[in-house]
Amino acid sequence: MKRKVYYLSTCDTCKRIMKEVKVDDSFVKQDIKTDPVTDEQVESMYAHTKSYEVLINKRARKLKAALETNPVKTDADYKKLLLLDYTFLKRPVLEIDGNLFVGNSPKTVAAIKTALSKE
């Protein structure tokens, strides 16, 4: 049973969702600011989503400037952005028994709760 959460410790939304879905000590917690995601981790996320763009936080303040210097022409260009700065990863990202849940939409939070209730 593998459980992991990629989050930002300074993000109130991440904290709220982690509390709401009851992220406990059974989860490996990775604060992406102090421990940035690796190429292998991004590849693992991609294996679930089949898209790097899905992993991008389009509301990140730095994104507009980054897109000017790193224009996106293909989905693989989004991977470069994900590895460039931690703020570009949509958060939180929860991995629960082979399933990946990305972001903070109510639908995603409900799916996380459902996945955790099945255990």
Image (spheres, rainbow, N blue to C red):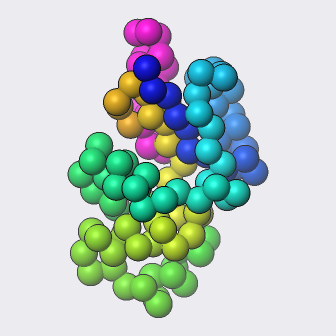
Left or right: residue 12 versus residue 32 is right
Q: Which residue is at 67% across, 58% downward?
A: 33
Seen in the picture, residue 82 relative to 71 is either above or below; the reply is above
The residue located at (64%, 55%) in the rendering is: 35
Farthest residue to the bottom: give it: 69
Q: Position of residue 110 (x, y in %)?
A: 46, 24
Q: Position of residue 83 (x, y in %)?
A: 48, 68
* Residue drawn 38% across the image and 37% down it: 100
Which quadrant holds the N terminus? Answer: top left
Quarter of the image for residue 119 reads top left
Give the x, y percent position of residue 50: 24, 51
Q: Is residue 98 above or below residue 41?
A: above
Whether residue 57 can be seen here: no
Q: Residue 71: x, y in percent? A: 37, 85
Q: Visible in this render: residue 61?
A: yes
Residue 94 relative to residue 31: left or right: left
Q: Is residue 84 above or below residue 110?
A: below
- Give the extent of the magenta segment: 101-119
**In this picture, residue 69 sits left or right of residue 35:** left
**Front one among 63 and 39:** 39
User: What secondary structure is the stretch in magenta mostly built from?
Assistant: helix
Q: Is residue 104 magenta?
A: yes
Count all numbered tags in the image, as a single digit: 0
Q: Residue at x 52, y 64 (%)?
A: 88
Q: Does residue 107 show up magenta in the picture?
A: yes
